[in-house]
Image: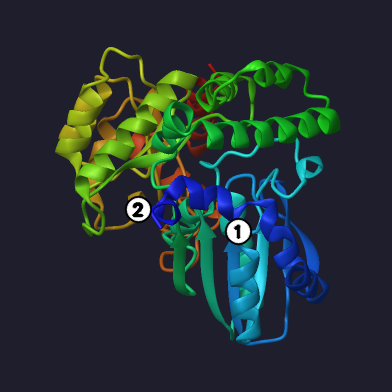
Amino acid sequence: MNLLKNGLFNTLLASSPLREKQQKTIRKELNIKSSKKIFTSSNSQSIEIFETDLYKKKVIFFPGWLGHKDSKYLIPLAHLLHTNNFDIIRIHPVDHGNTEHLNKDFFRATDIQTLIEAVKFIGNKYQDSEIHLIGFSLGGNISLRISASDSIDFLKSTIVLSPVIDPEISMLTMDNTAWILKKYFIDKWRRTLIRKIRFHNIANAEEALKYKSLEEMTEFFTKNLDENKKIIGVGETGLDFYYDNSDRDKQIESFKIHIKAALKANIPLIIHSRNAEEKTYEVLNEYKDEKLKILMHCFTGSQKFAEKLLKFNSYFSASGIITFKNSVDLQNTFKSLPLDRILIETDSPFLAPVPNRGKKNEPSFIDFTAAKLAEIKGIEKSELIKITTNNFNNLFFN
């Protein structure tokens, strides 16, 4: 009985070949009823989606790290729900389920934009349906973050099973105390990497195959972030004390993790700060000697806060808010900022500038923001566009 209560034993048992024969029939039945779709996101990543389409109630499944649609811990629950009139939608994140051929980019648990878009696609497709989300292990972590996304507001419920709350702690635990799990995941990860290297001829990734711990393999890919030209910044991240919907200490902890990641990769940190000027400055001041590259996203802070941030050579991005007639203080703040520290942004689909305030924002509306900021700075709009473009390049590509 004590063995059955052991988490490691249950993890291994869930993926044991002993369950293969038991699940063969129900797995085959579910796969026969499922259709396969390749979903491609706005950042050109492609993933597989398998779905049945018989009922009004839908359940989206995310497997654990390196799992797949037929994972032995997933199939019994999927079958049970399907027999109770739920459609089953199983999603393969990048590099899961032998899909290494679909993308040259490697799977990163921190990058869930493609998965958010896939879930949103499902929500739009089944607008009249009741939709639930279930995630296992690392898939539970991903599910929680997806359900917290501003663009996902239609989920009836999110259920996570043995979620990995802190991936780094889980990784170190496996490396140091759970050698069977360590070997299991390293072997699976190596097989995935070998397929990836073969499909896309990624020679520099072969070095990762020689490492003998999850930490070393992760460290290799983290160190090589700067070799991936698609990754140009970390964020947005920061502190938001306006609604107080999340624990402040956890926000600060997360903020510091992102700061360290930006420093390690030597790329800019895009910061969101709302009703948290004092604490944001306090945290950043801890890294004042680290040459951190800072962009204050959608800046609406006070002039005093801006002056303090200039000590860190920060950049400040103006959104459509600067065009609002009641934003006099913000306009004065941007008037005081050096031209070589200013950028413009949409924050689309939010914060459409005047004369489109209240509408869904879009990239073309940035012209109104540029015009207003040029007026504030007393220069031609064309000159402001040249300056802000140059500032962007200096921040992200120098």
Given the current orientation, which residue lies at the most extreme front position?
Answer: 1
The residue sitting at 49% across, 38% down in the picture is 381
Determine which residue is flagged by label 2: 321
**Coordinates of residue 219 in the picture (x, y in percent):** 52, 21
Kind of residue sitting beneath label 1: Glu
Structural distance between the alpha carbons of marks 1 and 2: 27 Å
Q: Nearer the viewer, residue 36 or 10?
A: 10
**Coordinates of residue 246 in the picture (x, y in percent):** 26, 55
Determine which residue is flagged by label 1: 117
Q: Nearer the viewer, residue 155 or 317?
A: 155
**Coordinates of residue 108 in the picture (x, y in percent):** 58, 38
Q: Is disc 1 surrounded by few (<14), some (14 to 19) or many (20+) residues within 10 Å?
A: some
The residue sitting at 73% across, 59% down in the picture is 20
**Coordinates of residue 18 in the picture (x, y in percent):** 68, 56
Residue 195's tag is: none
The residue sitting at 28% across, 20% down in the picture is 312
Horizontal side of residue 170 vs 20, given as left or right: left
Secondary structure at badge 2 equals helix
Horizontal side of residue 203 vs 239, given as left or right: right
Labels 1 and 2: the sequence-earlier one: 1
Q: Is disc 2 surrounded by few (<14), some (14 to 19) or many (20+) residues within 10 Å?
A: many
Horizontal side of residue 272 vs 83, given as left or right: left
